[in-house]
Each structure stands twice: as structure tokens, then as C-alpha cells.
Amino acid sequence: MRFYTTVMRREDIDQILAIENVSFPSPWGRKAFESELENPNARNIIVKEKRADGADRVVGYVCFWFVADEIHIMNIAVSLEYRRQGIGTKLLQQVFSEGCQKQRKVAVLETRPSNQPAISFYKKFGFKVVGRRPGYYSETGEDALIMSRQL
Ligand SMILES: CC(C)(COP(=O)(O)OP(=O)(O)OC[C@H]1O[C@@H](n2cnc3c(N)ncnc32)[C@H](O)[C@@H]1OP(=O)(O)O)[C@@H](O)C(=O)NCCC(=O)NCCS
């Protein structure tokens, strides 16, 4: 299998930051990922591409939290040149599968109304807009859409 899912480790963070920095207007820094790795309520999953030389490469990641009976998706991104190849789907399926295994009821996330690719992506998997947080993104003053989906 060319792409496989595994758990994020500290040594993956350099490759993750390279994806993060070209994916978001306000990217997370190294400390944010390190803190996710230390958070007992967080799960951090990556997709890697298998390489013949053994230097498998991170091509996408998702960070999510278990909060009461919900799952909160905190961050998800796929390397630019690997988008539209089902990697985001693989990551979301892992989130849903872990949520169901732990009997969580709903998955929740926030996204920018301007992020049409992400909104289309989430809608494909049954997420619906359920609310709005005014001025949530402080650097641009943009609102956040709250999207959720039953698990
Ligand atoms: C959103 C994101 C994670 C999707 O990852 P991906 O690996 O490209 O997604 P997939 O290939 O699994 O796409 C699954 C479906 O989502 C929808 N979709 C994904 N990207 C889309 C786009 N740019 N425009 C419209 N629909 C899109 C399509 O329905 C797609 O199915 P299709 O390719 O058969 O048409 C990726 O675009 C990304 O990293 N964006 C930057 C970071 C980001 O915005 N994260 C979300 C923050 S809230």
C-alpha cells in the first residue's frame, strides 16, 4: 500500500511544519504540535507515503481531541502536491473510526467561511454548518463556521 496511517511522533514534526506553513494563514508552530503530543485527550494521526529507500514521508495529518461525548478536530492538512488523492479522506475515516470505537456521538470543527475546499471536503462527509463564532480568527477578524456530524 503506497499510503498508510500511523501515530504522529516528535520526529515527524519537521515534515508536518513544512505542510502546515503552506496550508494556513496562521500556522501552528512546533510548540503547538509538541503540546498535542503530550495532551492525554488528544490523538494525532499522520498519513505517510511508503518509499523504497525506507525514508517514508509525511503527506498529511490530523489532530483531534476527545471532549465528553464529542470529537473536536483541531487541525487537518494534506501536503499541497498530494491533495485530491484521498489522503484527507483516509485521515477523516480514522477520526470517525476512533470516535465510534470510543462511543463518541458527534464530531465538531471550526473552519473559515473563505475556506471553500475545506467546506466542500467536510460536506462530502456529512458535516453541516451548525453555528458561527464572530471574529474567531483574530489575525483577520474572520468568523468561524462551526460544523458538526453525528458519528
Ligand atoms: C481540506 C484538505 C485536508 C482535503 O484533503 P485532500 O486529501 O485533498 O482530500 P480528499 O482527496 O480526500 O478529498 C475528498 C473530497 O473532498 C472534496 N474536496 C477536497 N478538496 C476539494 C477542493 N479543493 N475543492 C472542492 N472539493 C474538494 C471533494 O469532494 C473530494 O472528493 P473528489 O476528489 O473525489 O472530488 C486539504 O485541501 C488541505 O490540506 N487544505 C489546507 C488545510 C485546510 O484548510 N484544512 C482544513 C482546516 S478547517
Image: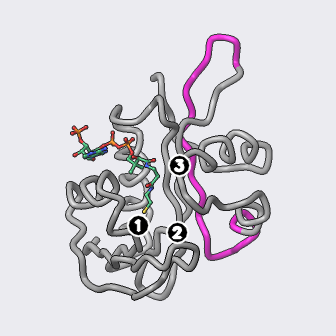
The tag earlier along the polypeptide, 1 or 2, is: 2
Task: Give coordinates of residue 1: x percent, y percent.
Answer: 45, 23
Whether residue 132 is in magenta: the answer is no
Judge: label 3 CB < 8 Å from ligand 1: yes
Q: Which residue is mark 1?
A: 101
Instruction: Check the image and report above or below for 59 versus 37.
Output: above
**Residue labelled with disc 3:** 23
Which residue is drawn at the image coordinates 59% and 64% (left, top)? Answer: 43
Report the amino acid beneath label 2.
Met
Q: CA distance from mark 2 to mark 3?
A: 14 Å
Which of discs 2 and 3 lies nearer the camera? The answer is: 3
Please name the amino acid that badge 1 sits on. Answer: Gln
Label 2: which residue?
A: 74
Farthest residue to the top: give it: 52
- What type is the residue that disc 3 sits on? Ser
> Which residue occupies 48% across, 82% down?
136
Q: In the rendered view of the protein, which quadrant contains the C terminus? A: bottom left
- At mark 3, the secondary structure is helix
- Using residue 65 as the reference point, say whether residue 121 is left or right of it: left
- In the image, the residue with mark 2 has its CB under 8 Å from the nearest atom of ligand 1: no
Task: Assess disc 3: are there few (<14), some (14-19) or many (≥20) residues with their C-alpha within 10 Å of its C-alpha.
Answer: some
Mark 1 vs mark 2, CA separation in Å:
19 Å
